[in-house]
Amino acid sequence: MEETLTILWTNADPITAKLMVFMYAENALARGWWKKVKIIVWGATAKLITENKEVREKLLDIKLKGVKVEACIACANELGVSEELMAMGFLVKGMGAPLTEVIKSGGKLITV
């Protein structure tokens, strides 16, 4: 069984991002709690990344440490931030089908 954790990040509160999403994602990978960790950026979090330097820098940092980051293109387009997210090196794509696959396959999912 592949040990992959997916974190669906929809809460645009920077404190929640820092003290839950990023902290757990980084530690889960670094400490071997999960072999792979992926964050799905969904909704207002896409805009938060482009507007909040601390959030953006920490997300880029954990991405460099091996946490996979993908963003919902429909959300990013609606918020006008697709190009900015792609320029930062984040994968921006349709996320409905990948999220559905995680759920249907019984994958491990945290929603924040």
Image: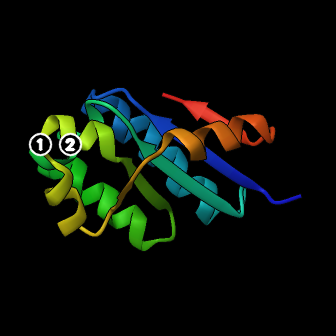
- Amino acid identity at mark 2: Asn
Q: Secondary structure at mark 1?
A: loop
On residue 8, the disc is none
Task: Tell me the residue at 12%/42% (across/down).
Answer: 80
- Amino acid identity at mark 1: Gly
Please say which color scheme the image uses.
rainbow
**In the rendered view of the protein, which quadrant contains the N terminus?**
bottom right
Q: Horizontal and vertical percent for residue 19? A: 40, 37
Q: Nearer the viewer, residue 27 or 104?
A: 104
| CB under 8 Å between discs 2 and 1 | yes
Task: Tell me the residue at 41%/66% (across/down).
Answer: 63
Q: Image height check: is 97 above or below 11?
A: below
Q: Horizontal and vertical percent for residue 100? A: 64, 37
How many callouts does the rendering have? 2
Q: According to the image, label 2 marks what residue?
A: 77
Q: According to the image, label 1 marks what residue?
A: 80
Q: Horizontal and vertical percent for residue 112? A: 48, 28
Instruction: Determine which quarter of the picture holds residue 74.
Output: top left
Q: Secondary structure at mark 2?
A: helix
Instruction: Check disc 1: other Cα within 10 Å, few if <14, some if 14-19, many if 20+.
Output: some
Label 2 to label 1, Cα distance in Å? 5 Å
Instruction: Check disc 2: other Cα within 10 Å, few if <14, some if 14-19, many if 20+.
Output: few
Q: Horizontal and vertical percent for residue 98? A: 59, 47
